[in-house]
Amino acid sequence: MGGAVSAGEDNDDLIDNLKEAQYIRTERVEQAFRAIDRGDYYLEGYRDNAYKDLAWKHGNIHLSAPCIYSEVMEALKLQPGLSFLNLGSGTGYLSTMVGLILGPFGINHGIELHSDVVEYAKEKLESFIKNSDSFDKFEFCEPAFVVGNCLEIASDSHQYDRIYCGAGVQKDHENYMKILLKVGGILVMPIEDQLTQILRTGQNTWESKNILAVSFAPLVQPNRNDNSKRDTVGLPPSSPGPPRGTFTSMHSPTRSRHPSREGSHRVGTTSLHGKRLLFLILPHTEEGQRVPPHSQPSTTEHLYQKIQILNETLVSIIPSLLLGLVRGSRHGGCLLPH
């Protein structure tokens, strides 16, 4: 599946072509696509095909065509702070792009059938975090990948705001997918040769919309020949952990990967003596209790925006505060990197 747009010379050229063909239609999706080079997810020796609008498969490793991923990203209508589940997460390419939009209060989970592909995804994720110039430009929701069959998810698993399934779903598994979705959530999956967007409008009501004619390999069915009890797939915790690169104590500096950019500030960052420091402010109730990021999903994005404003204010004053602490450390105060 693919070939809907012209081949590009590099990642930016490919994105330009996807925009021109109206597969990428929003700035948020465009920024995520430009931030992650599709070619980085190809094996050496196959990268020449990375910027063509074609699917690619080598052994268990698979990437859908760029036009498919574009339509999926647009149909998911991603926002900061949402929870996302990728069924058949593969190389982690899509999950990593999603993480750039979800931000530090999001949840980003993936299930992949093949353990070697999960290891490949983890390697690519670590490479992106360590080496990509784009990483420092985003507040990132790091994906967590687990090995398992997505048709064997534990029955008591939590629900998600957004779900994507990257394999063909048979009609008798449609309801199974739907119940993983929160009310108000969006599920995107290929079913009956149509990439379909499903909105859960109520406890027992859904609205469906066909997006694009597609051809996907079907989901692998669980092995039912074995009479022994099958293990169910346990999903990662539903609470977001600390974003990659942040610290929980003012005494612990984060790793600096781009010394040349240490002088430039962005939301939630500051620098001191060549060390880049990140901080995270969490909302509190009037009683002083921390507000769980997903206790009221409808207000998550509003809270996130208010926190960004607060962080911007703190960025302007925190260097002088840290300098005072450093000077104090030389006289028996707390120690900070210098």
Image (spheres, rainbow, N blue to C red):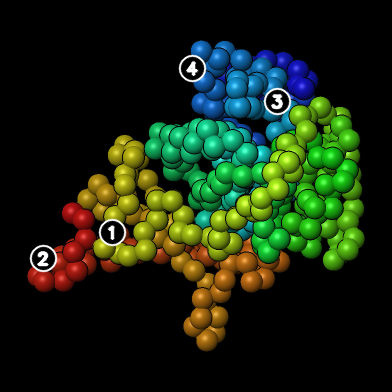
Mark 3 surroundings within 10 Å by alpha-carbon count, few (fewer than 14), some (14 through 19), many (20 or more)? some
Residue 190: image x %, image y %? 81, 37
In space, the residues marked 1 and 4 are separated at their CA atoms by 37 Å
Residue 210: image x %, image y %? 89, 39
Judge whether residue 304 can be spotted in this image. no
Residue pictured at 41% horizontal, 64% vertical = 314
Question: Dividing the picture into quarters, in which one does residue 226 lie?
Answer: top right
Judge whether residue 314 can be spotted in this image. yes
Earlier sequence position, callout 1 versus callout 4: 4
Residue under label 2, please give it: 330
The three-letter code of the residue at mark 4 reads Glu
- 27 sits to left or right of 268: right
The three-letter code of the residue at mark 3 reads Ala
Residue 104: image x %, image y %? 52, 56
- 316 sits to left or right of 128: left
Pick the front one: 35 or 122: 122
In the drawing, what numbered circle is on residue 303?
Answer: none
Residue under label 1, please give it: 252
Where disc 1 sits, the SS reads loop
Residue under label 4, please give it: 44
Where disc 4 sits, the SS reads loop
Pick the front one: 45 or 252: 45
Residue pictured at 60% horizontal, 55% vertical = 235
Nearer the observer: mark 4 or 3; the answer is: 4
Earlier sequence position, callout 4 versus callout 2: 4
Residue under label 3, please give it: 65
The three-letter code of the residue at mark 2 reads Arg
